[in-house]
Image (cartoon, coloured by chain):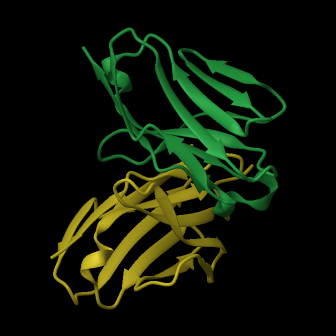
Amino acid sequence: QQQVKQSPQSLIVQKGGISIINCAYENTAFDYFPWYQQFPGKGPALLIAIRPDVSEKKEGRFTISFNKSAKQFSLHIMDSQPGDSATYFCAASRKNTGFQKLVFGTGTRLLVSP
Amino acid sequence: SQTIHQWPATLVQPVGSPLSLECTVEGTSNPNLYWYRQAAGRGLQLLFYSVGIGQISSEVPQNLSASRPQDRQFILSSKKLLLSDSGFYLCAYTGSGANVLTFGAGSRLTVL
């Protein structure tokens, strides 16, 4: 019940295309859903996060879509660029329980071809 | 501003040798500190976290230990490394406000 399932494991998208990464969770108590972006040899960095009281959050070319009833959330990268090539992790937790309870997906390696 | 430093960035050690990875945070007081291990295809696994000096919580039984000798210093150690300890180790913190988990650049450990 603590797992977050992420798919696909890897993704190749042409420059200018839309990259979509999906995550599913089981614990209905989760109320914080961040996405992290990790470039090779670097630590992950927070990209965008959403709370379940909204169905969508957009920051520039990055959008999180949230479906509470399906217990799914996804990251959309519009107009994907080669500089977006990285590994993306979704995560989930109950915010008030502390970040030690943050559960990560297994990651998606995105390659945007020029 | 708040920053996090990890070293060494890369380390190659023989089986049975000791390990010490260090992490320091600047620009905040009394941060919560975390050690994660990242293995290919397995995401991020929390190893230890600390809410204060000398306070260490272990999430998984293993060959590693952690210590927090100072408020903004977190150390990951082992007395005798195993081949299975190879991986990418990440230190992270939450600072004042505690609303964002920030990672360091990581330490790549290879045990031969």
Where is the N terminus of chain A found, in terms of image quarters?
bottom right
Q: Position of residue B29 (x, y in %)?
A: 66, 61
* Left or right side of B10 for A112: right
> Based on the displayed image, in which of its 4 quarters is residue B106 positioned?
bottom left
Where is the C terminus of chain A found, in terms of image quarters?
top left
Q: Residue at x 41, y 48 (%)?
A: A43
Residue B85 lies, with reference to residue B103, above or below; the image says below
Residue A92 lies, with reference to residue A84, above or below; the image says below
Q: Which shade of the palette goes to chain B?
A: yellow
Residue A36 lies, with reference to residue B90, above or below; the image says above
Number of marks drawn? 0
Q: Position of residue A10 (x, y in %)?
A: 36, 36
Residue A56 lies, with reference to residue B67, above or below; the image says above
Q: Position of residue A40 (x, y in %)?
A: 30, 42
> Based on the displayed image, in which of its 4 quarters is residue B95 positioned?
bottom right
* Left or right side of B103 for B55: right
Q: Is residue A50 visible?
A: yes
Chain shaded green: A
* Left or right side of A38 for B100: right
* Left or right side of B91 for B56: right
Q: Residue at x 35, y 46 (%)?
A: A42
| Residue sticking out furthest to the front | A70
Q: Is residue B31 visible?
A: no
Q: Position of residue B43 (x, y in %)?
A: 45, 54
Q: Residue at x 15, y 76 (%)?
A: B112
